[in-house]
Image (cartoon, helix red, strand yellow):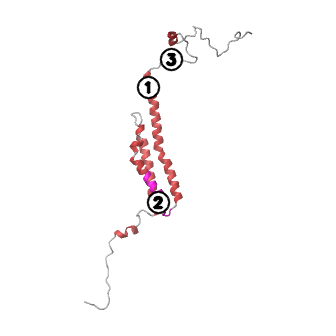
Amino acid sequence: MEKGKGLARRWAIELAETSALSSSSSQFSGIPDPPGYNISLHDQDDSTIAGQKKDAEAAWKSQKAWEVAQAPFKNLVMMGFMMWMAGSTVHLFSIGITFSALWQPISALKGVGKVFEPYKDKRVDTLAPKLLFIALNLAGLGLGVWKLNTLGLLPTHPSDWVSSLSPAPEVEFSGGGLLIN
């Protein structure tokens, strides 16, 4: 067999053939379409493609909004572990951890609108993720308040309010035997 003669390779394409012109764009340019190119896939309506892109973007925004809404749960677990490790005695570390557990949810609750701003879209409903975000941050706030109570820093006992009570009324008076004027 001479070189180039005999069995043709399966992957070889003769570009000089005019019978390979299959699509309408190839007929105008005189060059055949690349192998595997299907012009019918590109003839779709632009509005259909734009609608599909918008749907995909809306689905992505919805998924990311739910991820952001569930993020405080990770913080809640971590903060609970840190509070457990800090113990129940009042010292600098436990007070710092407790006030951090109170400050983080408060600052997150103040910025709910900013957190979900990138995911605003008329196709994306952010109400449920916002409610979950708020609920998890309120749970974190409750965890901080519980830790304050276990440290004894909340005034929950009557003895904590003794200074604001008026003195008890005198029921009896006792005195000595002599009356001095």
Q: Which residue is mark 2?
A: 95
The residue sitting at the front extreme is: 3
Q: Earlier in the sequence, mark 3 or mark 1?
A: 3
- In the rendered structure, which amino acid carries the disc numbered 3? Ser
- In the rendered structure, which amino acid carries the disc numbered 1? Ala
Q: Residues within 10 Å of mark 2 (few under 14, many from 20)?
A: some
- In the rendered structure, which amino acid carries the disc numbered 2? Ile
Q: Helix or strand or loop: what does disc 3 sit on? A: helix
Q: Residues within 10 Å of mark 3 (few under 14, many from 20)?
A: few
Q: Which residue is mark 3?
A: 40
Numbered tag placed on residue 50 in the rendering: 1
Tell whether position 96 is magenta.
Answer: yes
Q: Helix or strand or loop: what does disc 2 sit on? A: helix
The residue sitting at the right extreme is: 1
Relative to 27, is 5 on the left or the right? right
Seen from the viewer's position, the closer of residues 15 and 162 is 15
Q: Position of residue 139 (x, y in %)?
A: 45, 51
Tell whether position 81 is magenta.
Answer: no
Tag nearer the camera, 2 or 1: 2
Circles 2 and 1, Cβ within 8 Å, touching? The answer is: no
Which range of residues does the magenta coloring cover? 88-104
Seen at 47% across and 37% down, the residue is: 63
Seen at 40% across and 48% down, the residue is: 109
Q: Earlier in the sequence, mark 2 or mark 3?
A: 3
Q: CA distance from mark 2 to mark 1?
A: 54 Å
